Image: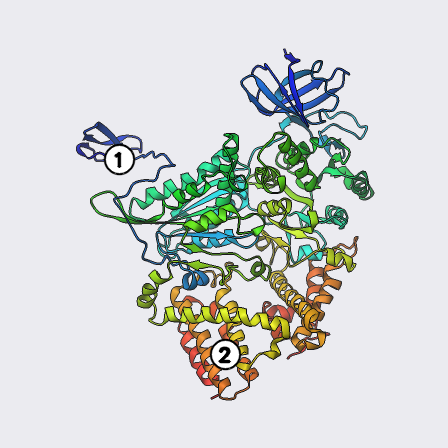
Amino acid sequence: MLKEYMTISEVRGPLMFVEKVDAVHYDELVEVELTSGEVRRGKVLEAHAGRALVQLFEGTTGIDIQGTKVRFLGRVIELPVSIDVLGRVFDGFGTAIDNGPKIIAEARREINGNPINPYARAYPSEFIQTGISAIDCMNPLVRGQKLPIFSGAGLPHPEMAAQIARQAKVLGVGENFAVVFGAMGITFEEADYFISDFRRTGAIERAVLFVNLADDPVIERIATPRMALTTAEFLAFEKGMHVLVILTDMTNYCEALREVSAARKEVPGRRGYPGYMYTDLATVYERAGRIKGKSGSITQIPILTMPEDDKTHPIPDLTGYITEGQIILSRELHKKGVYPPINVSLSLSRLKDKGIGAGKTREDHAGVLNELSGAYDRGLEARELAVVLGEAALTPGDKAFLRFADEFEGKFVRQSINEDRSIQQTLDIGWKLMTMLPRSELKRVSDAHVEKYMPKASQPATS
Amino acid sequence: MPEGVVREIHEGEYTVDEVVARVESSSGVHDIRMLQRWPVRRGRPVREKLAPVETMVTGQRVIDTFFPIAKGGTACIPGPFGSGKTVIQHQLSKWADAEIIVFVGCGERGNEMTDVLIEFPELKDPKSGEPLMERTVLVANTSNMPVAAREASVYTGVTIAEYYRDMGYSVALMADSTSRWAEALREISGRLEEMPGEEGYPAYLGSRAAEFYERSGRAVCLGKEGRIGTLTVVGAVSPPGGDLSEPVTQATLRIVKVFWGLDDRLAARKHFPAINWLLSYSLYTDKTAGFLRSAIAEEFPAMREQAMSLLQQEAELQEIVRLVGVDALSSRQRMVLETAKSLREDFLYQSAFHEVDTYCSLKKQYRILKLILMFNELGAKAVAAGAPLDRILSLPVRDRIARARLVPESEIDEFEKMEEEIRLEMPN
């Protein structure tokens, strides 16, 4: 029988202290009944010597210290999981909001999950074709990877994420895939964009959405990614599906974390964020990958908006230390009208080496990647020099690279929002661009590949 | 440690927790088993600590030639994310001249630790010919594993390392990344409601870090054989925002003798290892100079000085180039820039993923450096004698120098030929 307490001693922000409690456990789920009859949920943050610190997901506004009842439910937050969650929309706490029937649980899973033993992991190595050249060629995504998009306010990350969700495929393999979408603190319009896009393409039938909007309870945001990932883990490792998890916007998640930390009067770390934010983010991001002996996988694309476009801000900084690379968007490119505005130089995919090459993408992939990357960097340097000295002062070599950089941005990086390029098409565009450069400068591709793949019609000038 | 007399000793096959000997001392009779237990936060004792003298060759050019680490020494690798800390530590684990490697994954990515578990059994230790995994111990605490375990992980690792050192082995310990250990310290300190120091870290961060690094060294081990064991410690540091002025980096720099500073801009230009040659240092260069002279060549240390000087000059000249363009420089200055470029692209740059370039013997390092500096010397002379610079810069042998790092160890005689080619092609 559950005990009911009316011994709230203090309310502070989203937190409250309950006294004289018995056998209460860390992370235990709590039900709070206000005098109005409203029921809210929370969890135990701390329990010591008969006193419990409870965090309320819906906040503490309207709590009357005298008359409010608190019930400790004897279990941690669990999410009912089932294959039937596919096609459904839930709120940030896992309650269905699409007017559909209640989920009949196949199982209940604790939302914090368990870290995967490194020995049990299978190393990610299957190339995922997103159809976006700046990703597929330059910073490829591999099944089981966690590759975030570092965006900024007003940049087109929703469009990019939706495009990736639509177009992502593993070449040559029969698909048993799903998309799990976790929204934290985004606007109704942004959420609607995704949901409409999924509906339009029919992808909704293979998608599970957890939606905590900007006007939904802030503290609930902290549970939302865990709900999404618990569902993803069930679908991936118990149902053998390949799951793509999109989490947006992690910046809002971190803000919620900071709010709770401040209420707990914890000593803050950088910029007021909790000192444990690295670990907390790791408990979200590390829930990705493949497991030996299991056929499914979880690939994560978290999205965050960098405050002030600053990569050294704690949110992108700590994320970068955890994730396996990052796709960084550039405001400059966006202003020039380039979509997707991906800064290829600053972006990185740490798992690319094992996912590209013959049998995976194409034998010339590594060479093309290195060549385009090096040439683009030189072009950017030439651009900088031109700003200071004027284009007329550049050497002919620099001018060639400058033009290359412009064409690279205009033809390779830029593509339309519905354009789904195969890796072959992407690589061929790369070869066509390389014809702009003297053959002697192409040091990172083999002669054999030049023979085989470079378009013959316009042979490069020999200089 | 009390002294005693062996009362009983057995012969035969035993499990590790069976008693195999008994020693009587003033404090009673002690059972000796093969299994040992040791409190991880206490260093294991040695008879005498010695100063490190020998280079620990790593096969990474920028390290061995310019910023060497000695066996028993300490080094740190601070850098922002994506600058290559883990790749360097993996390279050291694969190629360093050490008999045992202890790799502590402290609060980092699970997939990286999996990478070690997959790759190392496939690679061969060049010395023993055995799979690399046979000489490696992995302590794995991923970033989403409990923080209290993370705090203990570095101590577990260093205790295991000391255990092997006490057998007379040369051991290298990689800690990736010490910043996570410091954060764990901060977290626990916060829960204990201790007064925080700088940036919320406990006031004892510096002393704890020093205690940890001091467990490295070269030592005469206990026991009458006088075995000498070495324990080299290399710690990665992950400063927030890549800003080295933060407490963990600063505390570490006060303690370690070698600093391999990773630079975001080098990483962005795909120059790896992204070790900034103007910022980094090694306090073992003098100690190891003697080794370079005797083992490789008398002139090697001097060549190193010259190369570093050229790179310094490049940095100064680049300032001018940025303002007024390269045409404002004299031919001699342009020659300096070209040689520095060659040093960067053909010597400092090293590909960890290329089957030949991943490991470069000290001998080959010397030969490559010699080629570059020889070209510089003869080229400068030719230019001073009136030859047009562009002609020197377009000599075919330059291409060969650029690919010298890809010449396999077994074909090291190629270098003789390349030196001949330089002499032949250079106009006089």
* Residue designated by label 2: B397
Using the image, determine if residue B236 lies above or below residue A429.
above
Q: Earlier in the sequence, mark 1 or mark 2?
A: 1
Viewer-proximal residue, A96 or B409?
Answer: A96
The picture places residue B19, in percent across and down from the top left corner, at 26, 30
Residue under mark 2: which chain is it in? B
- The residue that appears at 49% across and 32% down in the rendered structure is B194
Mark 2 is surrounded, within 10 Å at the Cα level, by few (under 14), some (14 to 19) or many (20 or more) other residues, namely many
Total marks in image: 2
Q: Are marks 1 and 2 on the same chain?
A: yes
Looking at the rendered structure, the kind of residue marked 2 is Val
- Going by the picture, which residue comes out furthest to the top? A1
Quadrant of image for the N terminus of chain A: top right
The picture places residue A229, in percent across and down from the top left corner, at 65, 36
Whether residue A177 can be seen here = no
* Residue designated by label 1: B13
Dots 1, 2 in contact, CB < 8 A: no
Using the image, determine if residue A431 lies above or below residue A235.
below
Residue under mark 1: which chain is it in? B
For label 2, the SS is helix
The picture places residue A233, in percent across and down from the top left corner, at 63, 35
- The residue that appears at 78% across and 33% down in the rendered structure is A215
- The residue that appears at 48% across and 72% down in the rendered structure is B310
Q: Which colour assignment does the render follow?
A: rainbow
The picture places residue A66, in percent across and down from the top left corner, at 70, 14
Viewer-proximal residue, A162 or B25?
Answer: B25
Whether residue B397 can be seen here = yes
Q: Mark 1 or mark 2, which is nearer to you?
A: 2
For label 1, the SS is loop
With A331 as the anchor, is B137 left or right in this view?
A: left
